[in-house]
Image (cartoon, coloured by chain):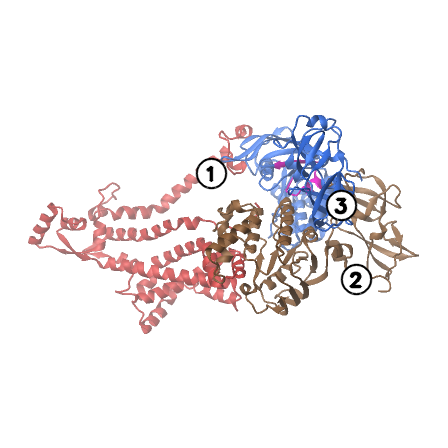
Chain colours: A brown, B red, C blue
């Protein structure tokens, strides 16, 4: 297991620059997540680290040593693909044994048997060992794919959106299992996804990627509580954060297009900026200072999403449990002041005064 | 029909199909169309059927007019095709008839005996046929092997000028064979490849290569790269990944390509006629030129054509499992 | 007007029972969701309604008229697919106009309907584009427009949001709901995502292994699941289900945890030695003098809230939803309470819910 340093990685394709000087590091035993929309460059990064492609600039270090010149086989990494990772003509056992049977390793058959059985137990697929992979369900297939990575006990696990093609419920279950497996094995893992729930629940640290650049790095708490840009703020959190255009006037912050206003915070505010409020910080409140009309109700059981119209704006509000409000109802609501986010016209977080 | 819309089909449907396919009127229409198609197919196959019948007729049956539909089948045609005969003199005739009575004579000899002849050896055609087998077989193997390697490279690697190269390869098929036959003849003469097996093998391989590269590239493109990349990461070399993973997945494509290449090489006529004479001549140019004494040996020609069809049919039939097998993919949301 | 009725509808593939005999009435203007994991029979059911799949048994009715064997194109239903199924060689405008032109409608009607639909879905700016160049969300809007333009009696949607990014899914979900409120068209919607089902459905049909597990409103399937499957499937994470022994007026759970039976449960559970106790993660609260105890196994950060995995004993792990401030290192012993109104019981063998004495919907306090 080991430390990974990615330095100034750049990769250009004929039509687009996939990565622009991307740098990040993570330590031995960490579960590091690259989070970003489709096409952001996350898979490219993973493939460069695996050695399946060559970068144009920059270097990759494993335990302090540059591995740029090594072939994929020499890098001692395991790759879990999103799909097509299992060989359909072989049984599950043979799929799991395949990495160990590579001529590079020359593992004796007895060791292979023990290793495969161990891995199968950890992933609870021992009963599937003799089946052909074509007969497995999606969740079972991905377990085998993860098993194939585990048997090698590599220094680094690379996972490319392995849960994306699974049913929602399966994803939930496998998320927990994967995280648990990683913690008990202590495996250094780089995990790529576009699903922010996966990132928040599984990661020790997250790097948010967009259009080939790293936009922010930090723990899940950092990313959620202190997003550096509106992009990051909108990417994490369901439902999406409310971004309201606002102006500063006479000692208060006035939200354009509605009657909402909040006191001016101790920040170096520009004249016009964006106010970010997470839906859970907007609550129906009979004593609240603002009012709006309920346009849509999405009952999710554990909580309810209310779409409120206030002036010209539509706000999302998240309330626990069932909502008593009805569509078309005029209600009053309040906003939790301590949790407001302020972003300047450049879409970056506005710093504290004096910083 | 109103009855169907109200009551549905008489037997419960327990397979995957749309409602409009189960409708009796639609089914009846489909059956009628299928029947008409069958009639048309039989009409199209008529020449082949006639040829088949002719192969088993006697000389006299063939010449009869109107053509005989019912006749006593015989292997006379095959005998004319495959053997050389000589007229036997009186004493030899007596010997042969004695042997025949004792059952010591082969089938063909007995047929020859009826015409007062004896078999003195295989005809030139047998050699031609074996040339066909050798030349078509080896050239097919070569073009498929080279084709699959080239197709893999075009599919997976960044080959400079890939698109141009592929087009160039395809363009070799755009010429009618006749156009290049004379230059080839002269070239081959110079190189000493005229009327040599090697010459024909090279020629057929090259001509089939364009087709096999394009067809196999299509199949290999469909095989997800992740399969080999997983192997590369696991410590296999490209070559090992190619043999253990890509080839088994490409079996359908390889089978299809083999059949097509074989059919081309086996049936090829123009080059075979122009570029060979005695030693390396294959079967197709030989069959029509079967001249007997005093006329065209129709039964021999028919026997030869029929016999010529059979090997290709056998190969295709043997490969049918691979031809029909679909390409399976990995994890699909199941 | 479009009331769809399924009466004993079943589908077999050879010996395999893909959909067991099913009875369902979809009322006019209702948005009904068929929810379940892959292979449960929901898509096959939808296809039988549309005519793209034949029924092995049973009958399908539209507004009282039997349509079981009617040609799919005669059923006046529009199908929306997961992978859009747009014609890539036609422009967006041509794609949307296609169904009307196929019906032979006059040019002015086609134009009028096209404009209506384009306004509703806000895709006016995309009319001359090719589908291949559009984002997933836009493509699905075009697919919806194409279905809408026919003014069909019913919409049948097969996991239309499945191919979209998580972000897009959220906004398209709200759009589909808004569309339904405006059009009030009868809709049958298939999905494996219970969040979608809860947000969109007037009623949800929960299916598993070819059978209907429960039919109810989102509130009903959430707060009163009919069996263990529904309890687990709805909600993320699903309901906590702990096997317990019933003795002395309490449920005895692993780890020496003893939970006194709340009001109304003593009689229905009387005579049972065992029952499965169920409670949702948000119905439990960590509290220093809680009745139950366990060891923290993991803490999951979910953005606005945290989920604690608490091991009661012998690997009986329950999930407790709490706010962001709560975070415990692995191994901490915690005590917690369960809201008595939110507790549910299930029979361990039949897996069915045990009905309380006086059926009262449990409401989680705000």
The residue depicted at 92 percent of the width and 56 percent of the height is A251
**Does residue B271 appear to the left or right of C341 in the view shown?**
left
Mark 2 is surrounded, within 10 Å at the Cα level, by few (under 14), some (14 to 19) or many (20 or more) other residues, namely few
Q: Position of residue C109 (x, y in %)?
A: 68, 42
**Which subunit holds the residue at mark 2?**
A
Q: Is residue C118 visible?
A: no
The residue depicted at 12 percent of the width and 47 percent of the height is B100
Question: Spatial distance from mark 2 to mark 1, Cα to Cα?
Answer: 66 Å
Query: Residue under circle 1?
Result: B30
**Does residue B50 appear to the left or right of B321 in the view shown?**
left
Q: Quadrant of residue C63?
A: top right
Start-end of magenta stretch: C189-207
Mark 1 is surrounded, within 10 Å at the Cα level, by few (under 14), some (14 to 19) or many (20 or more) other residues, namely few
Query: Residue under circle 2?
Result: A346
- Quarter occupied by the N terminus of chain C: top right
Dots 2, 1 in contact, CB < 8 A: no
**Which subunit holds the residue at mark 1?**
B
Mark 3 is surrounded, within 10 Å at the Cα level, by few (under 14), some (14 to 19) or many (20 or more) other residues, namely some
The residue mark sitting in front, 2 or 1, is 2
Q: Secondary structure at mark 3?
A: strand
The residue mark sitting in front, 3 or 2, is 3
- Give A347 or B173, whichever is nearer the viewer: A347
- Give A41 or C107, whichever is nearer the viewer: A41
Q: Position of residue B215 (x, y in %)?
A: 46, 58
Question: Spatial distance from mark 3 to mark 1, Cα to Cα?
Answer: 64 Å
Q: Is residue A181 above or below residue B156?
A: above
* Mark number, residue B91: none
Query: Residue under circle 3?
Result: C322
Q: Is residue A210 visible?
A: yes
């Amino acid at each position: 297991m080991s430390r990974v340093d990615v330095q100034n990685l750049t990769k250009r394709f004929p039509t687009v620059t996939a990565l622009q000087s991307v740098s990040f590091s993570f330590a031995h035993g960490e579960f590091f997540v690259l989070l970003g929309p489709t096409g952001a460059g996350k898979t490219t990064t993973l493939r460069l680290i695996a050695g399946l492609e060559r970068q144009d600039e920059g270097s990759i270090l494993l335990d302090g040593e540059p591995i740029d010149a090594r072939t994929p086989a020499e890098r001692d990494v395991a790759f879990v693909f999103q799909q097509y990772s299992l060989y359909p003509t072989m049984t599950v056992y043979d799929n799991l044994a395949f990495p160990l049977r590579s001529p590079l390793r020359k593992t004796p058959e007895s060791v292979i048997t023990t290793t495969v059985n161990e891995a199968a137990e950890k992933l609870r697929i021992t009963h599937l060992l003799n089946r052909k992979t074509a007969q497995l369900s999606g969740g079972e297939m991905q377990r085998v794919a993860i098993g194939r990575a585990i048997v090698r006990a590599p220094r680094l696990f690379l996972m490319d959106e392995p849960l994306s093609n699974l049913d929602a419920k399966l994803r939930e279950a496998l998320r927990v299992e994967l995280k648990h497996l990683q913690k008990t094995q202590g495996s250094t893992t780089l995990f790529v996804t576009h699903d922010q729930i996966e990132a928040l629940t599984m990661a020790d640290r997250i790097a948010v990627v967009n259009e080939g650049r790293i936009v922010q790095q930090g723990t899940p708490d950092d990313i959620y509580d202190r997003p550096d840009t509106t992009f990051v703020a909108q990417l994490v959190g369901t439902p999406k954060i409310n971004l309201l255009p606002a102006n500063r006037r006479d000692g208060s912050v006035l939200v354009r297009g509605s009657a909402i206003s909040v006191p001016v915070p101790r920040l170096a505010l520009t004249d016009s900026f964006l106010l970010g409020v997470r839906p859970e910080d907007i609550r129906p409140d009979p004593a609240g200072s603002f009012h709006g009309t309920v346009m849509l109700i999405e009952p999710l059981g554990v909580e309810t999403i209310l779409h409120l119209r206030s002036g010209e704006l539509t706000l999302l509000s998240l309330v626990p449990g069932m909502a008593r409000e009805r569509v078309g109802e005029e209600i009053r609501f309040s906003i939790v002041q301590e949790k407001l986010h302020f972003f300047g016209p450049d879409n970056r977080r506005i710093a504290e005064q004096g910083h | 029909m109103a009855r169907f819309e109200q009551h549905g089909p008489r037997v419960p449907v327990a397979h995957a199909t749309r409602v409009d396919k189960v409708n009796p009127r639609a089914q009846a229409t489909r059956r009628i169309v299928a029947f008409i198609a069958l009639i048309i197919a039989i009409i199209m196959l008529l020449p082949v059927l006639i040829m088949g019948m002719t192969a088993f007729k006697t000389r006299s049956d063939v010449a009869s007019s109107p053509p005989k539909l019912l006749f006593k089948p015989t292997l006379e045609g095959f005998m004319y095709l495959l053997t050389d005969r000589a007229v036997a003199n009186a004493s030899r005739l007596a010997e042969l008839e004695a042997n025949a009575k004792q059952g010591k004579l082969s089938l063909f000899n007995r047929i020859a005996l009826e015409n007062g002849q004896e078999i003195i050896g295989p005809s030139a055609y047998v050699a031609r046929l074996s040339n066909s087998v050798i030349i078509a077989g080896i050239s097919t193997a070569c073009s498929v092997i080279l084709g699959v390697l080239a197709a893999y490279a075009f599919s997976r690697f960044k080959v400079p000028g890939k698109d141009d190269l592929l087009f160039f390869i395809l363009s070799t098929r755009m010429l009618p064979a006749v156009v290049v036959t004379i230059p080839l003849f002269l070239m081959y003469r110079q190189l000493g490849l005229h009327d040599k097996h090697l010459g024909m093998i090279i020629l057929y391989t090259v001509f089939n290569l364009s087709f096999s590269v394009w067809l196999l590239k299509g199949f290999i493109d469909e095989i997800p790269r992740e399969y080999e990349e997983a192997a590369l990461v696991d410590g296999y070399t490209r070559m090992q990944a190619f043999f253990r993973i890509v080839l088994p997945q490409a079996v359908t494509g390889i089978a299809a390509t083999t059949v097509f290449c074989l059919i081309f090489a086996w049936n090829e006529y123009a080059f075979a006629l122009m570029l060979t004479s005695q030693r390396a001549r294959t079967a197709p140019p030989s069959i029509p030129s079967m001249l007997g004494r005093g006329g065209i040996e129709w039964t021999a020609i028919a026997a030869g054509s029929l016999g010529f069809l059979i090997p290709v049919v056998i190969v295709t039939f043997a490969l049918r499992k691979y031809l029909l097998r679909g390409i399976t993919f990995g994890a699909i949301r199941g | 007007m479009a009331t769809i009725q399924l009466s004993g509808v079943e589908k077999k593939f050879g010996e395999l029972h893909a959909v067991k005999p099913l009875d369902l009435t979809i009322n006019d203007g209702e948005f009904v969701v068929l929810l379940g994991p892959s292979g449960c029979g929901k898509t096959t059911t939808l296809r039988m309604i549309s005519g793209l799949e034949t029924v092995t048994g049973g009958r399908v009715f539209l507004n009282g008229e039997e349509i079981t064997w009617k040609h799919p194109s005669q059923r006046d239903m529009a199908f929306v697919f997961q992978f859009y199924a747009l014609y890539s060689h036609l422009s967006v405008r041509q794609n949307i106009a296609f169904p009307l032109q196929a019906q032979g409608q006059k040019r002015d009607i086609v134009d009028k309907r096209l404009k209506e639909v384009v306004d509703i879905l806000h895709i006016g700016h995309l009319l001359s584009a090719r589908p291949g160049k559009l984002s997933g969300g836009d493509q699905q809007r075009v697919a919806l427009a194409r279905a809408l333009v026919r003014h069909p009696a019913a919409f049948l949607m097969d996991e239309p949001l499945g191919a979209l990014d998580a972000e897009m899914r959220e906004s398209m979900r709200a759009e589909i709901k808004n569309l339904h409120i405006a059009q009030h068209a009868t809709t049958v919607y298939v999905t494996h995502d219970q969040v979608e089902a809860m947000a969109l459905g007037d009623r949800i049909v929960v299916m598993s292994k070819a059978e209907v597990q429960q039919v109810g409103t989102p509130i009903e399937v959430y707060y009163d699941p009919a069996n263990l499957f529904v309890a687990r499937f709805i909600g993320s994470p699903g309901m906590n289900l702990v096997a317990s022994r019933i003795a002395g007026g309490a449920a005895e759970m692993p780890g020496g945890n003893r939970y006194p039976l709340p009001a109304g449960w003593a009689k229905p559970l009387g005579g049972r030695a065992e029952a499965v106790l169920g409670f949702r993660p948000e119905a439990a609260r960590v509290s220093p003098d809680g009745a139950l105890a366990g060891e923290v196994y993991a803490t999951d950060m979910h953005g606005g809230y945290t989920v604690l995995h608490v091991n009661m004993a012998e690997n009986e792990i329950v999930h407790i939803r709490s706010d962001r401030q709560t975070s415990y290192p692995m191994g901490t012993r915690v005590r917690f309470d369960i809201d008595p109104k939110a507790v549910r019981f299930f029979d361990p063998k039949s897996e069915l819910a045990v009905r309380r004495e006086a059926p009262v919907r449990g409401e989680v306090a705000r």
